[in-house]
Image (cartoon, grey):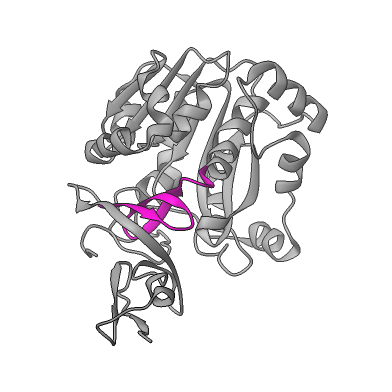
Amino acid sequence: MGEAVEVFYPNGFCNGTTKNQHVDDETHHQFDSWYEETIDEDLKWSFALNSVLYKGASEYQDIALLDTKRFGKVLVIDGKMQSAEVDEFIYHECLIHPALLFHSKPKTMFIMGGGEGSAAREALRHKSIDEVVMCDIDEEVVNFCRRYLTVNRDAFCNKKLNLVINDAKAELEKRTEKFDIIVGDLADPVEGGPCYQLYTKSFYEKILKPKLNENGIFVTQAGPAGIFTHKEVFSSIYNTIRQVFKYVLAYTAHVPSFADTWGWVMASDQPFSIGAEEIDKRIAERVDGELLYLNGSSFLSSATMNKTVYLSLLNETHVYTEENARFIPGHGLGNHF
């Protein structure tokens, strides 16, 4: 009987080999191609592949688009999974809908990042939205997501979407208009990556907040928020935003393909004061189609932290600056697959 032997490479691909030339039916069903991601220095997450749809490096980031056995198409940037076809709705519903639902009548949104198009897709489901500006620095990521992620094809073709290829910081600085909602759908802050400066206090205070309308809301993805991972960047991003906005709400959800609980932070100078019934009412009135994950009760529950995470958020003192950033395990362009 042939025995599959997998050889793994950090944040990269591996190929299985067999000890025997002849492989029987049972062995044939064993997966012989895997992708591995480092979650921590002593913990790795690997998943079996059907194929590698794209692998390369743009000017800014390492990029891979994988077809996996368990999670469907998976987008990987700088060695970190960004989204998976089967459960990306969890991440993107949590990122996009709460801010839109808590706002009284949102009309305009600016998305920092979001090149795969899923954040824009969810935003465009809101009937009140007149314009979504999606600003991603990496045209190569946008182009191959438009080609391969067919679920977002309608969003990319929507006349309300204004797609801009630029650095989000520079784009916000030069724009004269303000927005009801600004979204950070950025890659995780990894050392050497292009995004960590968009998590700093100076960026939030001097560039982002002045571009919000009165009663405007900012929301960002904030990295792993699990019992063992929330101190990597989640608590620090939360505390940094607290220095800039009067009302800050952290919330979390488990994303199976991330192998962890994930965190988001929403902020405004106006309180978040609506309850579960009103959230459900606004979903019914404002959103086209059914949400798969989010409702009023689940959102309010997601904003209740367990004791360990709650105390970490309460006691966190680190503030993101350009000189004093925190990073999650991973790599930037300087370290290829």
| Residue 65 falls inside the magenta stretch | yes
Where residue 17 appears, x then y in whole percent?
A: 28, 79
Name the residue at 55% across, 33% down.
96
Instruction: Read off the magenta span.
Output: 62-88
Quick check: 335 left or right of 78?
Answer: left
Name the residue at 43% across, 61% down.
326
Q: Which residue of the protein is positioned furthest toward the left in this rendering?
A: 59
- Image quarter where the C terminus lies is bottom left
Where residue 205 appears, x then y in whole percent?
A: 46, 37
Where residue 186 appears, x then y in whole percent?
A: 41, 44
| Residue 165 falls inside the magenta stretch | no
Asked whether 61 or 284 is in front, the reply is 284
Asked whether 70 or 46 is in front, the reply is 70
Quick check: 70 left or right of 247?
Answer: left
- Prevailing secondary structure of the magenta residues: strand
Compared to residue 152, the image places residue 85 above or below, namely: below
- Image quarter where the N terminus lies is bottom left
Asked whether 64 or 187 is in front, the reply is 64
Q: Quadrant of residue 116?
A: top left
Compared to residue 173, the image places residue 201 above or below, namely: below
